[in-house]
Image (tube, rainbow, N blue to C red):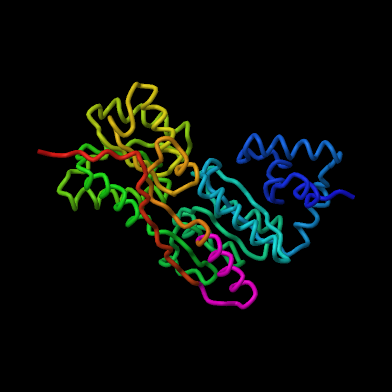
Amino acid sequence: MVTIKDIARESGYSVSTVSRVLNHRSDVSPDAKQKIEAVVTKFNFVPNNNAKHLKQNNSKSIGVMVKGISNMLFASIVEEIQRMIEKTEYTLVVSYLDEDADEVEQAILLCRERKPLGLLFLGGNPDYFKKEFAGVDVPCVLVTNRANQMEFRNLSSVATDDVAAARRAVDVLFDAGHEKIGILGGDFTKSYTSYQRLRGCSDSFAAHGAVFDADRCYEKARFSFDSGYRGMERLVTKFPDITAVFAMSDVTAIGAIRALRDRGLRVPEDISIIGFDGTTLAEYYNPKLATIKQQYQRLASRSIEILFGQIELKKEPIHEIVPFEFVNGESIRVIEHG
């Protein structure tokens, strides 16, 4: 009998990548999809979904709640988690949610239906945790957001300091001589990540003696190419003399660059842009995107290690901050003031 591992071996891709193709996920390159589907056809492979479901219900499973279907950082973290889990006796159950969804409500449903031994939350809103997390009774780790102030006995966290990282991003633009700076970010009334990064932006403006007028310089954009494109169009319309933009994700930044080019504007000659996440796409985009890089491999590995420690050794909650770094690409122009 041909298995998914046989398909992976024959195609040259990982089991997790093959799984995403078989589950019709969008976060796979067209080339990989074509090659894997060709191997599937060659071997006449049919996934046994009933067996898969039975296995997940009766095995040692770990649930992963992913907020945002277009978040490339989360895609990288999930890939790393899958790679690590494949070496253990655990299986992975991944659930993708809208970036504004109630992840704790969905986690309670997952626990009821699949009975995982632990959960990882990629992105999270503390308001949902404070209201509902008491209904989750398995060890959990909140990844990329902090949970140290919530004091749940079964909740750890591994995160980047979003406030400090966003402040660093805007500091870079001020230090490059920019004074008319715009921000593209999520709905900070719903997204805790966007709220934290907005705080960092405001801190940077204050430190440089600049007035932070959110009505003028902040435009909502979800963490996707399309939303970044449309958000940039609105931002440049209401702030026409803008010279630099901080986008709260790399995909938002790249969507914004496309919008500027379609308007006949150049990056960085006319408008400079800095992103956030440090994705592989940012490194190979033209121009190479300046960005705040999160250590996705460290975020993934520590999250798994901490979760296993809680599941297997009943360890106390741990809250860690993973350092970030500024990557100086080609998307920021230095303005000389006479």
**Left or right of residue 196, residue 2 in this image:** right
Residue that appears at 45% across and 44% down: 283
Residue that appears at 19% across and 40% down: 179
Task: Looking at the picture, tell me which residue is in the foreground, 7 or 148.
Answer: 7
Task: Looking at the picture, tell me which residue is in the foreground, 155 or 170.
Answer: 170
Residue range (magenta): 299-317
The quarter of the displayed image where residue 58 is located? bottom right
Residue that appears at 18% across and 43% down: 211
Task: Looking at the picture, tell me which residue is in the foreground, 27 or 115.
Answer: 27
**Left or right of residue 227, residue 207 in this image:** left
The quarter of the displayed image where residue 189 is located? top left
Q: As drawn, which residue projects farthest toward the right? A: 1
> In the figure, 258 relative to 88: above or below?
above
**Left or right of residue 168, residue 158 in this image:** right
* Total labels drawn: 0
Q: Percent x, y for residue 158?
A: 48, 63
Q: Percent x, y for residue 8?
A: 75, 48
**Left or right of residue 226, residue 182 in this image:** left
Q: Is 126 a magenta residue?
A: no
Q: Main secondary structure of the magenta part?
A: helix
Question: Which quadrant would the C terminus be assigned to in this image?
Answer: top left
Q: Percent x, y for residue 210?
A: 17, 45
Q: Percent x, y for residue 217?
A: 27, 37
Q: Is 312 a magenta residue?
A: yes
> In the figure, 26 relative to 9: above or below?
above
